[in-house]
Image (spheres, rainbow, N blue to C red):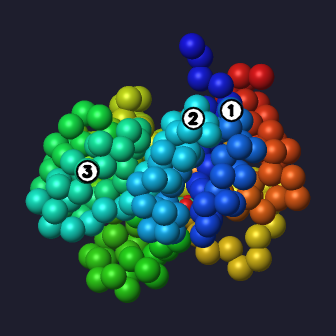
């Protein structure tokens, strides 16, 4: 079946309590392609939150744990994750050994997405973290370096900003997924926005993003369902799916 506009949308359940998360799961079930469970909710609720989302909806689940530890610990954590029945988990691309063990621990049941460079990191953040001058001058080179590690370690894809998607697709092929956060539709006005390397939904999918993570523009809209529909229309128009 052809991928529809809604299938591109990952809605993060960035809530501190299960009541709010449930409300949005019910509201957006069938209107988005995936729900993302992040640290806030997972720490508060534990694995039972995954069961809640599965019970209340039919959409895929992306567990955004952003794992980063010694490889053996990551593998053991991934073996636990593989029992939860989630489709994707994130692991930081900081060492090939860690990524390989993460993939191994996922046992083919849970796909690993490598986190390249967080979209609230700009060149100043790269410099402050002590990276080489070439990465400070061109953070996309760091993204590509890390994407290569993820690709060679057997990850299903990477998290990257819309600005790097084209290059990632060109270098690693269509089936290596590019998942893009930092999505800001032109109609969104967020005060003091922390996201730096941003793209609109239309730009991201036109550049080749397979999935777009879009939270606050939907969550904080006057009508989240209407905002979701606007994003779907923009995606479909950009891809001429409508
Ligand atoms: O659209 P909004 O900025 O609200 O999206 C925030 C969500 O995107 C959070 O769940 C955050 O963890 C996720 N995110 C991510 N990777 C990034 C930046 C944000 O997964 N590089």
Quadrant of the snapshot with the N terminus? top right
Q: Can you give x and y, in whole percent of width and height, for residue 29 in the image?
A: 68, 38
Q: Which residue occupies 79% across, 35% down?
A: 233
Distance from the alpha carbon under mark 2 to that under mark 3? 21 Å
Task: Report the side of 139 relative to 229 (left or right).
Answer: left
Front-most of 139 and 209? 209
Mark whose residue sits in front, 3 or 1? 3
Q: Is residue 198 visible?
A: no
Provide the secondary structure element on which disc 1 rests.
Answer: loop
- First reached walking from the N terminus: tag 1 or tag 2: 1
How would you rate the neighbour count of disc 2 (Cα within 10 Å): few for under 14, some for 14-19, many for 20 or more? some
Quadrant of the snapshot with the C terminus? top right
Q: Are marks 1 and 2 in contact (CB under 8 Å)?
A: yes
How many numbered circles does the render carry? 3
Q: Can you give x and y, in whole percent of width and height, for residue 145 in the image?
A: 28, 56
Provide the secondary structure element on which disc 2 rests.
Answer: loop
Q: Quadrant of residue 154?
A: top left
Distance from the alpha carbon under mark 3 to that under mark 1? 28 Å
Distance from the alpha carbon under mark 1 to that under mark 2? 7 Å
Residue under pointer 3: 80
Residue under pointer 2: 59
Q: Quadrant of residue 69?
A: bottom left
How would you rate the neighbour count of disc 1 (Cα within 10 Å): few for under 14, some for 14-19, many for 20 or more? some
Provide the secondary structure element on which disc 3 rests.
Answer: helix
Q: Can you give x and y, in whole percent of width and height, for residue 43 in the image?
A: 44, 68
Res. 30 mark = 1
Q: Say above or below: 28 vs 189.
A: above
Q: Is residue 22 visible?
A: yes
- First reached walking from the N terminus: tag 2 or tag 3: 2
Q: Which residue occupies 61% across, 60% down?
A: 18
Task: Report the side of 1 relative to 235 (left or right).
Answer: left
């Amino acid at each position: 079946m052809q991928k529809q506009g809604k299938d591109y949308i990952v809605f993060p359940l960035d809530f501190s309590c299960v009541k709010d998360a449930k409300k949005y799961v019910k509201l957006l079930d069938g209107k988005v392609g995936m729900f993302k469970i992040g640290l806030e909710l997972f720490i508060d609720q534990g694995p039972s939150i995954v069961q809640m989302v599965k019970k209340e909806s039919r959409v895929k689940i992306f567990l955004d744990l952003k794992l980063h530890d010694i490889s053996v610990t990551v593998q053991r954590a991934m073996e636990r994750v593989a029992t939860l029945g989630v489709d994707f988990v994130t692991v930081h691309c900081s060492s090939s050994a860690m990524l390989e063990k993460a993939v191994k621990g996922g046992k083919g049941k849970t796909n690993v997405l490598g986190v390249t460079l967080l979209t609230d990191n700009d060149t100043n953040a790269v410099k402050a973290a002590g990276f080489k001058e070439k990465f400070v001058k061109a953070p996309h080179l760091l993204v590509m370096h890390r994407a290569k590690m993820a690709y060679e370690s057997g990850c299903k894809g990477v998290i990257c900003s819309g600005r790097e998607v084209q290059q990632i697709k060109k270098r690693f092929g269509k089936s290596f997924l590019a998942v893009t956060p930092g999505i800001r539709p032109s109609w969104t006005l967020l005060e003091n926005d922390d996201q730096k390397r941003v793209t609109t939904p239309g730009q991201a999918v036109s550049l080749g993003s397979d999935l777009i993570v879009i939270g606050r523009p939907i969550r904080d809209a006057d009508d989240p369902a209407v905002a979701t529909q606007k994003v779907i229309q923009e995606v479909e128009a950009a891809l001429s799916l409508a």
